[in-house]
Image (spheres, rainbow, N blue to C red):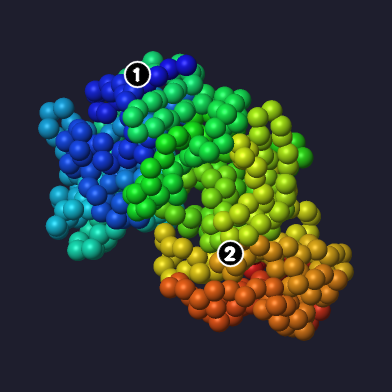
Amino acid sequence: MRQHISFYVGDTLHTLSNLPPEMTLLDWLRDQQNRAGTKEGCNEGDCGACTVLVGRLEQGALVWRAVNACIHMVWMLDGAQLLTVEDVRGADGQLHPVQQAMVDEHGSQCGFCTPGFVMSMVALSTRADLAELEGTLDGERIINEALAGNLCRCTGYAPIVRAMKKAAAYCAEHGEPISARTPELTARLRGLQDGKTVELRSPEGRVTLPASVDALASAYAQDPAAVLVAGGTDVGLWVTKRLRQLPHIIAVRTAQDLHKVHTRPDGALWIGAGVTYTEAMPHLVAHLPAAADTLRRIGSTQVRNAATVCGNIGNASPIGDGPPIFMAAGAQLHLRCGPEHRVVPLEAFFLEYGKQDIRPGEFIEGVLIPPLAQGSVCGVYKVSKRFDQDISAVLGAFVLLLAEDGTIEQARLAYGGMAGIPCRAKKAEAALVGQARTQATLLAAQAAIKEDFTPLSDMRASAWYRATVAANLLARLFDTGATGNPSNSQTLENWQEVAHG
């Protein structure tokens, strides 16, 4: 066991042992390292002014991720390379191509948000496939996604997007300066990887960084009152907004055997508790293609780089976007307490608001999402006030299995935002099963949805709005535009058109 963490900031190695559990990276950088380029804006992971670049070895290769320093704890950096805006200029003082492009394209006015934008743009410029993406429609979408977690109130986004395109073109032709250091930085980080569990102690509390799932199970069984932290995108707000003190934190993502994500021989998708949304995204999109657009709207790039799929389930938010999708797909949650394992259907995990089917010392090891049966139709729709980085008013996820004659054989309708927990619309499902896809069937299911839920009114939406939208989302799935009495193959084709947008 090790009693300290080690990581690089720029070219300086830092070794820390006496560290308060809830010390954020933003506070450490500004207050203790005098790195004031990283700004404090919203202090909750929304505005991106505090964006920094974290490099880690993923399957032996150096990968850069933009993260929000305001909700990233310092202890999360063990074994990593950190770059702030002060580090991206060359040793000779030459600006990074992103910085130069921001100057050339007038991408900054007051400048408060600029360091965060620069770091998100530098992260994008390190992508190995940047040359292939440059100038394409896919490249345009990726730029917009990369900048969706950064807010600017005075410049306007057009000059910033132009700057990113200019920087991307330059880096594609001349190379990206940070990427040029990959061999050196990779060797540096390899020297920090020792596979040991870490225990940090300070007067304010302690942090346990288990190296394996067995070490995690042992630590949590010994102290079930400890707070489990994966990506910290939710727990970080406990610290910055509620000013909570966390006497004992046990990390989830340091257990390397929880980072597995793969498709099993039976077609089921396994996502370990340490897998972030960014890491899981290509697997999820391949497994549930109808959910692709909604999955890309979960948080921002910075949030998805830190937030884990299982953490999104474990915090049991009634408006979490992942659980309704996985619930509709019939996911199973794998739990562990010490040496004991159990499996529960995801929908059975959520009992009521703030209460889950989880025992003291028990934690989520992973989630298993079965393959969709042949003949299944899937639709996932998110309704929110903003397209990017906004909390859902209502999210509907639907999986229907069609029989050979086109009738609905099985139905799984899951909603977020409609109750104190994400849950299925059981009465609406019953109204669909055994019925043909007709207007009468749709009306019956829509009426049943109003019996399934009694939603709340809040700042995001009224109860009437939520109930109306929930019913309308089902109508969207039904509205295939087909006429007459199509064959089963035509019906499936039409359903799939709707499911894929």
Left or right, 170 with reference to 58? left
User: Does residue 187 show up?
Assistant: yes
Disc ID at residue 420: 2
The quadrant of the picture occupied by the C terminus is: bottom right
Closer to the camera in the image, 385 or 487: 385
- Label 1: few (<14), some or many (≥20) within 10 Å? some
Q: Position of residue 328 (x, y in %)?
A: 68, 58
User: Does residue 77 show up?
Assistant: no
Residue displayed at 59% across by 26% down: 218
Report the amino acid beneath label 1.
Answer: Arg
Residue displayed at 56% across by 67% down: 417
Where is 269 relative to 372, above or below? above
**Of pointers 1 and 2, the one earlier in the residue sequence:** 1
**Residue 290, picture quadrant:** bottom right
In the displayed orientation, state which residue is furthest to the left. Answer: 93
Residue displayed at 64% across by 68% down: 498
Q: Position of residue 446 (x, y in %)?
A: 69, 79
- Label 2: few (<14), some or many (≥20) within 10 Å? many
In the displayed orientation, state which residue is furthest to the front. Answer: 203
Disc ID at residue 28: none
Residue carrying label 1: 188
Left or right, 295 with reference to 488? left
Q: Marks 2 and 1: in contact by CB < 8 Å? A: no
Closer to the camera in the image, 335 or 36: 335
